Image (cartoon, grey):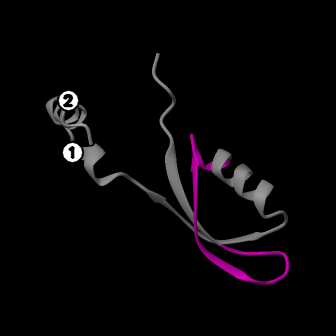
Amino acid sequence: MFAPLMTKYVYQIRSRNGAIVDNLQIYGRDEAEAQRKLQQMYRNCEILDSKIVTPERAANSSYEDVLNLIASGR
């Protein structure tokens, strides 16, 4: 059985003391999980911006590309 696909979410937040934190990268199965993790690390923060980072190669990779990558040891 395969592990669940994790997506990378990138956030810009304002912490509870007012500091702006950019480029917080959090993995989650969905956005709700990523935001839950974010709230555990930065309690009572305000999310100013969020975006999803999609792997560039994964969208265009074929089965043969994946096998070649594994065989090459990268």
Residue 43: x and y in percent read: 84, 63
The kind of secondary structure element at disc 2 is helix
Residue drawn at point x = 80 percent, y = 84 percent = 18
Residue drawn at point x = 17 percent, y = 36 percent = 65
What is the total number of numbered labels drawn onto the structure image?
2
Q: Given contact means CB atoms under 8 Å apart, are the residues at marks 1 and 2 in contact?
A: no
The stretch of residues the image draws in magenta is: 13-32
Would you place residue 20 above or below residue 62 in this image?
A: below
Q: Residues within 10 Å of mark 2 (few under 14, many from 20)?
A: few
Would you place residue 33 above or below residue 14 in this image?
A: above
Cα separation, mark 1 vs mark 2, equals 14 Å
**Residue 10, quarter of the rendered image:** bottom right
Q: Residue furthest front?
A: 73
In the rendering, which numbered label is found on residue 22?
Answer: none
Q: Is residue 16 left or right of residue 72?
A: right
Residue drawn at point x = 64 percent, y = 50 percent = 34
Q: What amino acid type should be assigned to the residue bearing mark 2?
A: Leu
Q: Is residue 57 left or right of residue 7?
A: left
Q: Is residue 7 left or right of residue 11?
A: left
Residue 26: x and y in percent read: 59, 55
Residue 5: x and y in percent read: 47, 35
Residue drawn at point x = 49 percent, y = 47 percent = 7
The quarter of the rendered structure image containing the C terminus is top left
The kind of secondary structure element at disc 1 is helix
Does residue 14 belong to the magenta stretch? yes
Name the residue tied to disc 1: 60
Q: What amino acid type should be assigned to the residue bearing mark 1?
A: Asn
Name the residue tied to disc 2: 67
Does residue 12 belong to the magenta stretch? no
